[in-house]
Amino acid sequence: MSFNIAIDGPAGAGKSTIAKLAAKELGFIYVDTGAMYRTIALGLLRKHTDCEDEGQLGQALEEIQVEMAYEAGAQQMLLNGENVTGLIRTEEVSRMASISSAKPAVREKLLLMQRSLAASRDVIMDGRDIGTRILPQAQLKIYLTASTRARAERRYLELRQKGEACSLEEIEKDMKERDYRDMHRETAPLKQARDAVLVDTSHMTIQEVVERIVALARERQ
Ligand code: DC
């Protein structure tokens, strides 16, 4: 049977950085489900889809094809055959991903893809509802969080490094709005699974968090 680790938590808690490193150490595959929602969001933006119009959303989703591939161990996202990995980290896509991922039709589209990836392989999968909905049987569940300020500062540095103009206040405000939407939506809201281990990364180094997760995984393997 495959060993599954579910990592959930708000944006900027360090999920992807930590999950990637832990996956490497454990020899697992890392699956970033946020990237899948971002790929759909980019598709919807390109089509100028109004997500509040169910018919329009359904039609757009039929025309949007999402695929995943690995290149030198790094997850690549394909949108209708085009590699869009480098295009899905903008604030515009972030905002659209937060809005569209609240729609049941969008979540349904990705559910089977996520479950089947985990069924056959040892994976660390990160997202918002992995421990609560996608992989309720995961052998290890982590709820990774940090203060809003700490998370906004991390995102700010990330964007600055990429040369994107941004303001910390604006990022923090956006982040609060997004957290609120992710936590209060009707479908698959972000919340800690009852059997998840809570890890607050506000005052931890990346290496400390990775060691904690790897140790927990080894205990349970
Ligand atoms: O983790 P991220 O910032 O790349 O996620 C982008 C958006 O997708 C975010 O608003 C939450 C949503 N998401 C989700 O609803 N469920 C997931 N499993 C992963 C991401």
Image (cartoon, rainbow, N blue to C red):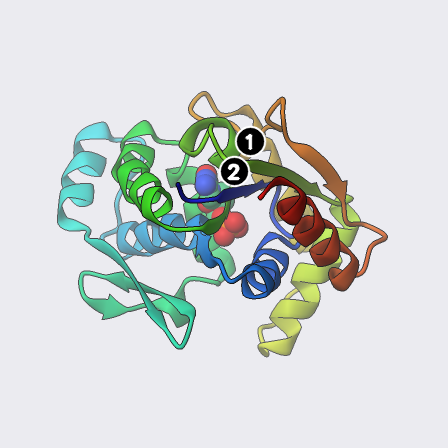
- 108 or 206: nearer the viewer: 206
Is residue 191 or residue 149 the one in the foreground?
A: 191
Left or right placement of residue 111 versus residue 210 in this view: left
**Relative to 192, is 170 above or below?**
below
Judge by depth and name the residue closer to the eye, 13 or 193: 193
Assess whether mark 1 and mark 2 are in contact (beta carbons under 8 angstroms): yes
Task: Tell me if residue 167 can be seen.
Answer: no
Query: Label 1 amino acid?
Result: Leu
The residue at 28%/39% (across/down) is 50
Q: Position of residue 6 (x, y in %)?
A: 53, 41
Q: Give neighbour class at mark 1: few <14, some 14-19, many 20+ (Cα, 10 Å).
A: many
Ligand 1 has an atom within 8 Å of the beta carbon of the residue at disc 2? yes
Q: State the SS at label 1.
A: loop
CB at mark 1 closer than 8 A to ligand 1? yes
Q: Quadrant of the C terminus?
A: top right
Report how far apart the C-alphas of labels 2 and 1 lie in the structure: 5 Å
Q: How many marks?
A: 2
Provide the residue designation for mark 1.
190
Q: Residue drawn 20% across and 43% down?
A: 61
Please state which amino acid type lies under the numbered disc 2: Arg
Q: Quadrant of the N terminus?
A: top left
